[in-house]
Image (cartoon, rainbow, N blue to C red):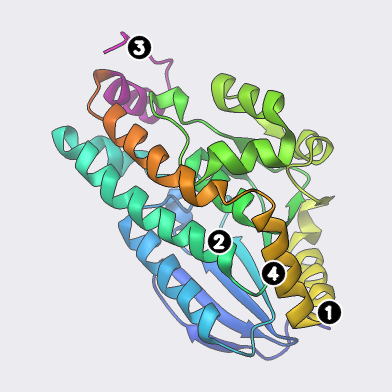
Amino acid sequence: MSVTESRETLIADGPALLELRPGGIGHLQMNRPASANGLNLEMLQGLHLAVQRCMTEPRIRVVLLTGKGANFCAGGDVHVFASKGDELPYFIRQATALLQVVIGALIHLDAPLVAAVQGFTAGGGGMGLLCASDLVIASESAKFLAGATRVGMAPDAGLSVTLPRLIGARKAAEMLLMNPTVSAAEALESGLINRVVPDAELEASALAYAMKLAAGAPLALAATKRLLWAGVGLGVDAAMPEEARTVAALCHTQDVREGLAAVIEKRSARFIGR
């Protein structure tokens, strides 16, 4: 089926867009391309609204999650973080609470969630969205970076549970503690993603992938998805509040301010341990 066939717009503007494509594909697109689809409060609120719409739209059989522009999602918006000063811990509490709601809603969607990623997927937010997806297809040039400890923070969005579940404890520890930039080929080999395609073919391949899934039995797919997530032992729901508490506490430190400044200024951070 052509990607240019008629579509129905469900959310037409804002930081998160939603349209219904032929075949029952709900296309949810992050729409802050100038900020690499960084997650500010408005984006998180928009994602929450869009996911709620997906939950209540019976015609949606599969959700396809994408990011507009050159990158899928760079995680939390470091420029917003750095602007908060002494208020950062309280802002982080609000942001992580919203992020938890979004991640939980994506996990508990009946419709399978397919992510199509290009450019960078980074931070707790970007990687959290990736790991909350049921299936992931990536372009050849895609890159993956956890990055939280690079700015003196800790993983959030359920990442401390979902990432080890996908790639194993040792690989997850390396990715979360050492912050390597992981290529699409490495991500495929580790099990972080399902498929790699040429950059120019990502949109068409992801849509075809989603449509093949949408042709399946909806009730069976929803039940299988629930069973797969239940196999995690409900660890994500239990872990996210503790992650949020940890990240908010770290945001009281000078190291977080230094880490954010270093990323914005494109230099190495000088952490002092307080």
Horizontal side of residue 112 vs 2, given as left or right? left
Label 1 neighbour load within 10 Å: few <14, some 14-19, many 20+: few
The residue where tag 1 is placed is: 216
Label 3 neighbour load within 10 Å: few <14, some 14-19, many 20+: some
The residue where tag 4 is placed is: 112
The reply to whether the C-beta atoms of the residues labelled 3 and 2 are less than 8 Å apart is no
Q: The N terminus appears in which quarter of the rendering?
A: bottom right
Q: Is residue 207 visible?
A: yes
Q: At 69% across and 43% down in the image, what residue appears?
A: 142
Q: Quadrant of residue 191?
A: top right
Q: Is residue 75 visible?
A: no
The residue where tag 2 is placed is: 68
Identify the mark nearer the N-term, 4 or 3: 4
Q: Tell me how many marks there are.
A: 4
Q: Secondary structure at mark 4?
A: loop
Q: Start and end of the magenta stretch?
A: 255-274
Residue 250 drawn above or below residue 106: above
Of badges 4 and 2, nearer the viewer stands 4
Q: Secondary structure at mark 3?
A: loop
The residue where tag 3 is placed is: 271
Of badges 1 and 3, nearer the viewer stands 1
Amino acid at circle 2: Lys
Q: At 51% across and 85% down in the image, what residue appears?
A: 56
Label 4 neighbour load within 10 Å: few <14, some 14-19, many 20+: many
